[in-house]
Amino acid sequence: MDLNQVRAYINSNQDRFLEELVELLKIPSVSADSAYKNDVQICAEHVKESLLSAGVDVAEVCQTDGHPIVYAEKIVDPSKPTILVYGHYDVQPADPVELWNSPPFEPVIKDGKIYARGSADDKGQFYMHVKAFELLQEMGELPCNVKFMIEGEEEVGSVNLGIFVKENKERLKADVILISDTSIIDNDTPSITVGLRGLSYVEVEVTGPSKDLHSGVYGGAIDNPINVLCEMIASLKDDNDHITVEGFYDRVEEVSAEDRAEMAKAPFNKEEYMAAVGVRATRSEKGYSPREGASIRPTLDVNGIWGGYIGEGAKTVLPSKANAKISMRLVPDQDPIEITELFRKHFEKIAPDTVSVKVEAHHGGDPIVIPTDFPGYVAASLAMEDTFGKKPIPERGGGSIPIVALFEEELGLKSILMGFGLDSDDIHSPNEHYGVFNYLKGIETIPFFHLHFAKLGLAKKI
């Protein structure tokens, strides 16, 4: 099998590949909202049928206490290396829907991009693997055993995946885990993610009076929880954008000047970066570039804040409560459980006597760094060099995929993060999209990962 054969197969099946993805994107598999529970189940069944059509021998929808996991496999020869493909079919809520240029679950292909919720994160990316698997099957070139584990709870913290993994270690035995849920630098500059930030996600509640009060009668005498919450949040960073939580940086791994210099070689146009997200300036921790601030440094951000009256018109109320959701992206060697506890203690400490506070921990995950000398990375690098015509740049990503650490702990397997999205795909935002080029490029490149890993993995076994 050579590149021309692969491209010919993709060209002759391009319309079908796009039509199948569009049908998948029509299913509103929002895992965070119970109103979509039935749609999530329907999507799992759809994924199962897609895998069976692609040629797996076994596929099933595995129920959990939450949303189901789709498992499938094709064992060509037990003596050959095995690739475990991980992805997720659940998607983020589409809100605010009014900011979409087209309905989020009515996919539109425009200007070379597929607009729909989940197009890049992660339906378009995991479906590349289904079609790449089909391609290898049809060309009689499947060189490895392949297993698929596509879950429905990634966007809510993979709540039940850990249980599934622990209970199915034998079934999930493999030599490497292959994941496409990350991005490349740009369509002319391939890259492989070799690091991800961890995550600590909390929800805070500030309570003042036992009930909402008239702001004229009580304002000036009773503290306002919204005002207090805003003051507390503002104090969580200093003028240098350094996080003020005591002990927060104690375990932070400082990236060497040499590694920072290598990272700086990656193409980056600051003006284009700002224009893509509609800002007039960037803001990062003092001493670090925007790219560094979004990858090798920890962060603290408010993801949502509410309280009081937000309906139409005016209501002069002094609210009883104010709430916020706060996420902290972590870097090696920060521990999410420890960071959550440090945040809790700090938040309680800075609260004035006029209010009480509560900190509720949500999901989290460990930061990870992937070595560039193991067969999975080498195979991915060679595959991208085959199809892009240039060696990919190893790069640290700013996002979090908590299950990568879980896989290494429970299955003893390293993951290779070979994504094909772009940072400008607006994942988690209105008008999420995925490039047609990127979708097809993934289908083109993934078969070569299989071919290279078959040689490298077999050599390692021998």
Image (cartoon, rainbow, N blue to C red):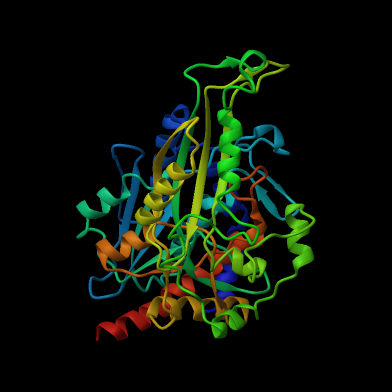
Residue drawn at x 32%, y 54% as measured from the top left: 72
Percent of width and height locating residue 282: 72, 60
Please state the total of marks drawn on the protein image. Answer: 0
Q: Horizontally, is 133 left or right of 182 in the view? A: left
Let me know if residue 46 appears in the view: no
Percent of width and height locating residue 279: 76, 54
Say which quarter of the image contains residue 295: bottom right
Q: Between residues 219 and 73, which one lies in front from this camera angle? A: 219
Residue drawn at x 54%, y 37% as measured from the top left: 93
| Rendered-image quadrant of the C terminus | bottom left
234 up-or-down from 315: above or below: below
Q: Horizontally, is 435 left or right of 193 in the view? A: right
Q: Between residues 145 and 372, which one lies in front from this camera angle? A: 372
Residue drawn at x 63%, y 45% as measured from the top left: 429
Let me know if residue 442 appears in the view: yes
318 up-or-down from 346: above or below: above
315 up-or-down from 184: above or below: above
Percent of width and height locating residue 358: 42, 35
194 up-or-down from 284: above or below: below
Percent of width and height locating residue 416: 43, 69
Q: Horizontally, is 79 left or right of 415 in the view? A: left
Q: Horizontally, is 270 left or right of 147 in the view? A: right
